[in-house]
Amino acid sequence: MFPDPEALRRDLLTLAEMESPSSDPVAVARVLDTVEGWACDLGAEVQLLSGGTRRFAFGVDGTRSPLLILAHADTVWPHGTLADMPLRVEGERLYGPGVYDMKAGLVGAIHALRALAGQWPAGGIVLLVTPDEEIGSPSSRAHIEHEAGAARAALVPEPPVGAADTAHAHALKTGRKGVIDAALTLTGQAAHAGNEPERGASAIAAAAGLIPQIEALARPELGTTVLVTQIAGGTASNVVPAGCRLGLDVRVAQAGEDERVMRELAALTPADGRVQAEWALTLNRPPFPRSPETLALFARAQAAAQDLGFKLSETAVGGGSDGNFTAPLCPTLDGLGAPGDGAHAAHEHIRLDLWPERVALLAELLRRV
């Protein structure tokens, strides 16, 4: 019923030994080539889409909307990371860059498909593997939304929640916050800080005045957070600073909050009229709300987990994924990847002992949904 742990580990090491930073499409393509080989062994129909995304179709015949599995092959780690963070196994933990987010999820998807042994559900399955999730999916978003619009459900093998703790190792993600990319550039007037400060217009002082106004746009009761997380400005201690830049972290849980926050940010101006403000505001990912359809999908997963002998829980989280793009278009269940911890961190790892049952769960969902 559960997949072979050694085969899972072997295939994960194959992918993890290929460094695949989002900035290097050739390196990411090497991972995708390997996945394509595995998919072809299962009889997939393969399409190379624009931007490097690959679509693998299994038994898609048009009789019913297919199921969508959504994964990515890129990581945040630059070339050379393996030299400092080598792959290693310590007890039940396999450590290494990209293993948790999300090469184990990608391997698990392949093994879940293998478990079906070609007995595809009605309508078939589409496995969509993208090359740029870690940088906001600029080339793959349109492909994701196209497939989600045609799917009856989307299953996302990103890491689950709280996976370092066995008691919470199987919490699926039934909601995610939307993410707004926001930055403010302020341009004032430089002057000698000692001789004639009155002739200057401080961009840093303007920023200091705006920060409380910016963060006041948060609505915690609605799940909206607005934080200034970066500030840079000035040239020398004896110069009135003519330039300053603020970076923000903005997340929204409800539809419509993204529009409100961007509108109200754009309306903020410095008190000193000599300082010019230029906002850069882009919706990186829309909110992924906890809809009744997604909760119904989770209920099916919960029943499958019980049949497999373990308990399953669910939660909403603040981070975004490509599931944010599918959730407005079809029921979406996220966090179906390998339990572990340390995404984007030096202690990134997966739990080898808990991984096989997670893969078995994904296979059961493909049979039942």
Image (cartoon, helix red, strand yellow):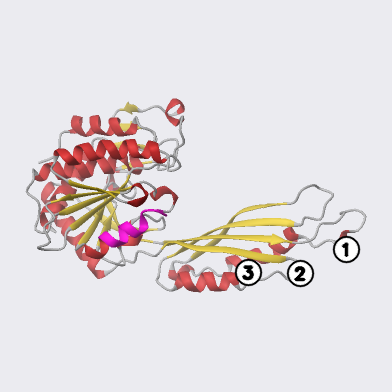
Magenta-drawn stretch contains 143:
yes
Q: Is residue 72 or residue 217 the one in the foreground?
A: 72
Q: In which quarter of the view is residue 18 placed?
A: top left
- Magenta range is 137-147
Q: In which quarter of the view is residue 329 placed?
A: bottom left
Q: Where does the N terminus fall, quadrant-wise?
A: top left
- Give, as a three-letter code, the residue at label 3: Gln
Whichever of labels 1 and 3 marks the residue nearer the N terminus, that label is 1
Residue designated by label 3: 213
Q: Where does the C terminus fall, quadrant-wise?
A: bottom left
* Residue at point 48%, 67% (across, down): 220
Residue 321 appears at what percent x and percent y? 37, 54
Horizontal placement of 228 versus 204: left or right? Answer: left
Whichever of labels 2 and 1 marks the residue nearer the N terminus, that label is 1
Residue designated by label 2: 272
* Residue at point 35%, 64% (across, down): 288
Horizontal placement of 226 versus 69: left or right? Answer: right
Q: Secondary structure at mark 1?
A: helix
* Residue at point 17%, 44% (across, down): 112
Which secondary structure dominates the residues rendered in magenta? Answer: helix
Marking on residue 198: 1
Horizontal placement of 57 versus 266: left or right? Answer: left
Q: Secondary structure at mark 3?
A: helix
Q: Secondary structure at mark 2?
A: loop
